[in-house]
Image: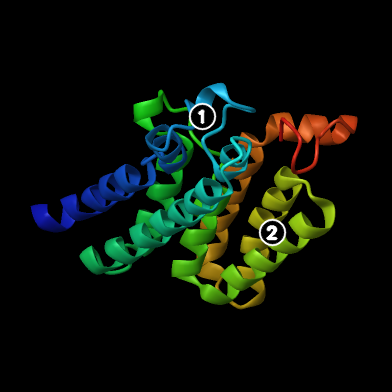
Amino acid sequence: MTFDTAIAPIGVLLLGYLLGSIPFGLLLTRFFGAGDLRQIGSGNIGATNVLRTGRKGLAAATLLLDLAKGAAAVWIAGRLLPGGGVLGGLAAFIGHCYPVWLRFNGGKGVATMMGVVLALHWPSAIVFAVVWLGLLAVLRISSLAGMSAAISAPVSAAFFGRIDLVLMLLALAMIVLWKHRANIDRLLNGTEPRIGKKRD
C-alpha cells in the first residue's frame, strides 16, 4: 500500500465532513435577515425550524441544499476514490449533525440522509421520500415523518438486495433517532406539536 492509497480515504472523509458541515439553514436565515436560527423555535438549524421564521422559500432552499450536500459528498467521493461514496456520504451526514463550526451542535440529519441515500441507491430514496412526505402530509408531525423515513432506508435497501448498504444506513438511522430523542419523549407524552406550532 502506497502513501497515496493510504491517505485517500482520510481525504475523502475530511472532504465529506467539511461539505456536510455547511449550515445552510443558519447561513440563509442570517443572509436574508431572518435572525439567528439557533434563537428561534427549537434552535435547530434544519428546514423545519427555518419554516418557523415564516420564510417558506428559505425553508425549501434549506431542505434542498441539505439534501444536495449529502448527494454531492457521495458523488465527489466516489470519483476521488473507487468505492468511496459510502465514506463520503457517512462523513457528510456526521458533518451535518455534528459540525465543528457550531460546537458539534448541528441538524437532525433527515434531509442530508435522504441525499446520501439518493446518491447511493435511488430506489431506496424513493421509498424514503414517500414515507417522509406521505406521513408529513397525513400526520403533520415533522419529527415522526423524518424518523420513519430514516428507518425505512436500511429496510428498503435490504428489500432491494443492497445488503452492502444496510449497516451504514442503519447507523445513520440510529443517529437520526438519537438526534430526535427529545421529540421521542414528547411523542410518548402526547405533547409533540404538529407543523405550524412553535416547537417540533
Label 1 crowding class (10 Å Cα cut-off): few <14, some 14-19, many 20+? many
**Quick one: 9 or 115, which is closer to the camera?**
115
State whether residue 177 is above or below residue 63.
Answer: above
The correct choice, above or below, for 91 with respect to 52 in the image is: below
Q: Residue at x 69, y 68 (%)?
A: 130
Mark 1 belongs to which amino acid? Leu
**Residue pictured at 83% horizontal, 58% vertical:** 138
Q: Position of residue 59 (x, y in %)?
A: 55, 47
Q: Which mark is residue 37?
A: 1
Residue bearing the label numbered 2: 132
Q: Secondary structure at mark 1?
A: helix
Is 188 situated left or right of 124 in this image? right
Residue 27 quadrant: top left
- Front residue of 80/149: it is 149
Quadrant of the drawing holding the C terminus = top right
Q: Residues within 10 Å of mark 2 (few under 14, many from 20)?
A: many
Residue 86 image position (x, y, % from top left): 40, 60
The residue drawn where x is 28% and y is 63% is: 76
Rendered location of residue 149, percent (x, y): 67, 57
Alpha-carbon distance for marks 1 and 2?
Answer: 23 Å
